[in-house]
Each structure stands twice: as C-alpha cells, then as structure tokens.
Amino acid sequence: MATKRNYKKEYKEYHCKKEQKKNRASRNTARRRAVAAGKVKKGSCKDVHHKDGNPRNNKKSNLAVVSRKKNRGTLRTKKNKK
C-alpha cells in the first residue's frame, strides 16, 4: 500500500528554499524565451532542456527543445548531468 504524500512537509523542506526558487525562476525564464523566439508553443508537449543540467545557465547554446518524455526521463545525478 502506498503512503500519502505530505505536500506541506515537501514544500517546507525543498520547494520553499531560496536556491530552489531561483532555479524554478530560471527554468521559467528559459521557457518564456523559447516561446518568444518561436522555438516552442504554449501547450505543446515539449520541454526546454538544459544540456548541462544547470537550470541557471540560460545560454542559447545550453538550451534545447525536447519531448517531455526525453527530458523528464533522464536520470539526474552528480555523475550524469545530461
């Protein structure tokens, strides 16, 4: 039997941290820039992928538009940043 997620605890311990807020803001900025440049459309099933795994690096050479499955399926560890 699966346990229920404690969203309040999860937010308190992870999502409300300053570093995570900055990372989220940077990912949103990358998405907005890709939409404005016409690389991806709102509502499409595409994600803006940071090639080096650093969400704060929004250089054009570091961003790529990929499918959600490919972007969210990659395991992100310290050894494998891609």
Image (spheres, helix red, strand yellow):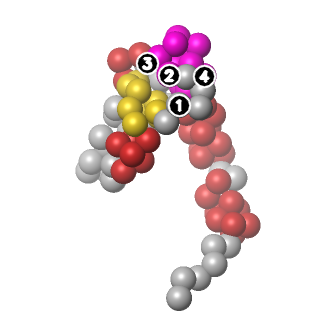
Q: Earlier in the sequence, mark 1 or mark 3?
A: 1
Span highlighted in magenta in the image = 29-40
Q: Residue furthest right?
A: 8
Report the residue at 52% width, 11% height from top.
37
Label 2: which residue? 40
Mark 3 or 2, nearer chain start? 2
The 10 Å Cα crowd at callout 2, few under 14, some 14 to 19, many 20 or more, is some
Residue density around tag 4, few if under 14, some if 14–19, many if 20 or more, within 10 Å: some
Q: Which residue is mark 4?
A: 32
Q: Amino acid at mark 3?
A: Lys
Which marked residue is nearer to the observer: mark 1 or mark 3?
1
Q: For the point 50% across and 22% down, which residue is it?
A: 40
Q: How many marks?
A: 4
Q: Work out which residue is located at the far top of the displayed protein and give it.
A: 37
In the rendered image, residue 41, in percent from the top left (x then y), is placed at 55, 22
Sequence-first disc among 1 and 4: 4
Q: Is residue 21 above or below residue 17?
A: above
For numbered disc 3, what is the local secondary structure? loop
38 or 54: nearer the eye?
Answer: 38
- Residue at horizontal 26 percent and vertical 50 percent from the top: 79
Nearest to the eye among marks 3 and 2: give it: 2
Question: Quick one: label 4 or label 3, which is nearer the N terminus?
Answer: 4
Dot 1 corresponds to which residue? Answer: 44
Does dot 1 land on a helix, a strand or a loop?
loop
Badge 1, how many Cα within 10 Å: few under 14, some, many 20+?
Answer: few
Query: Which of the two residues, 67 or 51, is positioned nearer the viewer here?
Result: 67
Q: Residues within 10 Å of mark 3 (few under 14, many from 20)?
A: few
Q: Is residue 51 left or right of residue 11?
A: left
Q: Residue at 43% of width from left, 18% of height from top?
A: 59
The span from disc 2 to disc 1 (Cα, nearest Å) is: 7 Å
Is residue 80 highlighted in magenta?
no
